[in-house]
Amino acid sequence: MAKGSLPQRLQDVQATEEMRIDMHNGEFNRVLGGGLVPGSLVLLGGEPGIGKSTLALQVLMQQGERKTFYASGEESARQIKLRAERIAGNAENLYISSETSLERILEQVKELEPEIVVIDSIQTIGTEAIEATIGSLSQVRECAARIMEFAKTRNIPFIIIGHINKEGSLAGPKVLEHIVDTVLQFEGDQQYMYRILRAQKNRFGSTSEIGIYEMQQNGLREVTNPSELLLSTAREGLSGIAIAAAVEGVRPFLIEVQALVSSAAYGTPQRSSTGFDGRRLNMLLAVLEKRVGFKLLQKDVFLNIAGGLKVQDPAIDLAVLAAVLSSNMDIALDAGTCLCGEVGLAGEIRPVNRIEQRIAEAQKLGFKRILIPAEQKIDAKRYSIEVVGVKKVTDAFRLLIKG
Ligand code: TYD
Ligand code: MG
């Protein structure tokens, strides 16, 4: 029996920090949990056209002295070159190969001995070991398992790209997620330039971090201060806009919630929501009807999160309602105020997580006042921004409309 497989006393096990490869890309490092772990297998998933190839190639081009390898089963060497030329970076030690055979790719890796390998994409390569067609479930699974084994034995990290379909499942659905160490999801609305990198699974770090990028002409720019990007400058005096102090992952940022309420043109009023859960919007509108006495039955309500962002944070509830109210009354809310609070069925404002970070972010961006759940006890003296606790939706509205 191999020595390593003998039982060890727990207290004899050395639990030192995993070694990390600094990717020279702050957002990427952050999502990985502090850098790439040698010998790990990372799956980078996302819809076609979102920017996976661009991100992967760009990250390799940021490696400077390190030897890196980009194997593509999708594009010719010339196409890869053209893409690389658009992206700013130093490609001196980047090797590429246009190849669909896994065996040949791994041969090339053995010969080249790169420090990081990207395979673009897992659906376009195949192993001779099994008969299945390239892109089929069993091919994808078999290739991933072989890459995993190779990565672990040689201690070389691999990033494999995987396309997901519109339903959001990786082609060959969850099969890959079980095999790999880390699953990163690259997402965003293609109409907008923001892209979010999210860890869905991470054996070597938390899954609450997100990375934010902006797709530009010359590749992806890291967005270190998302709030500035997401707030439109010309919102003053406009009705139907409220600013929420949100948290995605562990990062606070301010987002602009836009609502349009108008008389229903047809019998059944429309309810439409972009970037925010539609069922939650309906629930919030019911609260507005029942608890605040707003008659919205004959109204169309459109809701939009600016910038094409999808927000899951319940703390933006209050801003959603404020935007709806503002549009309905056609009164602009005070532009210097932002909001956070989950709204309950009784119209009560419920506590939210990371309240200090939200307040600090609002203050940093020059807001004069923030409305927070009254229940949350914070030391207001620590902030220069005015912090106001609100108990009910109606309390918040009173403050917002009076200015
Ligand atoms: P791509 O990385 O090919 O997406 P994926 O690999 O996820 O399918 O990128 C798709 C889009 O990005 C494409 O429409 C062109 C655009 N793009 C830029 O805007 N700037 C750039 O520097 C590059 C390389 C691509
Ligand atoms: Mg691609």
Image (cartoon, rainbow, N blue to C red):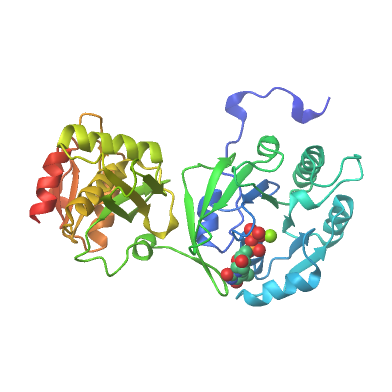
Taking depth in this image into account, of 82 and 280 the one nearest to the observer is: 280
Figure check: 384 above or below 138: below
Figure check: 172 above or below 19: above
Q: Position of residue 381 (x, y in %)?
A: 12, 50
Figure check: 349 above or below 89: above
Query: Residue 220 vs residue 372: left or right?
Result: right
Seen at 43% across and 46% down, the residue is 249
Tell which quarter ligand 2 is in: bottom right
- Camera sees residue 289: yes
Q: Position of residue 160 (x, y in %)?
A: 70, 51
Taking depth in this image into account, of 204 and 98 the one nearest to the observer is: 98
Name the residue furthest left: 402
Query: Residue 60 vs residue 250: left or right?
Result: right
User: Which corner quadrant of the image does residue 243 belong to?
Assistant: bottom left
Q: Position of residue 131 (x, y in %)?
A: 91, 40
Taking depth in this image into account, of 166 and 180 the one nearest to the observer is: 166
State how many labels appear: 0
Quarter that holds the C terminus: bottom left
Seen at 75% across and 62% down, the residue is 69
- Camera sees residue 33: no
Q: Position of residue 117 (x, y in %)?
A: 73, 57
Seen at 65% across and 41% down, the residue is 181
Quarter that holds the N terminus: top right
Query: Residue 275 vs residue 47: left or right?
Result: left
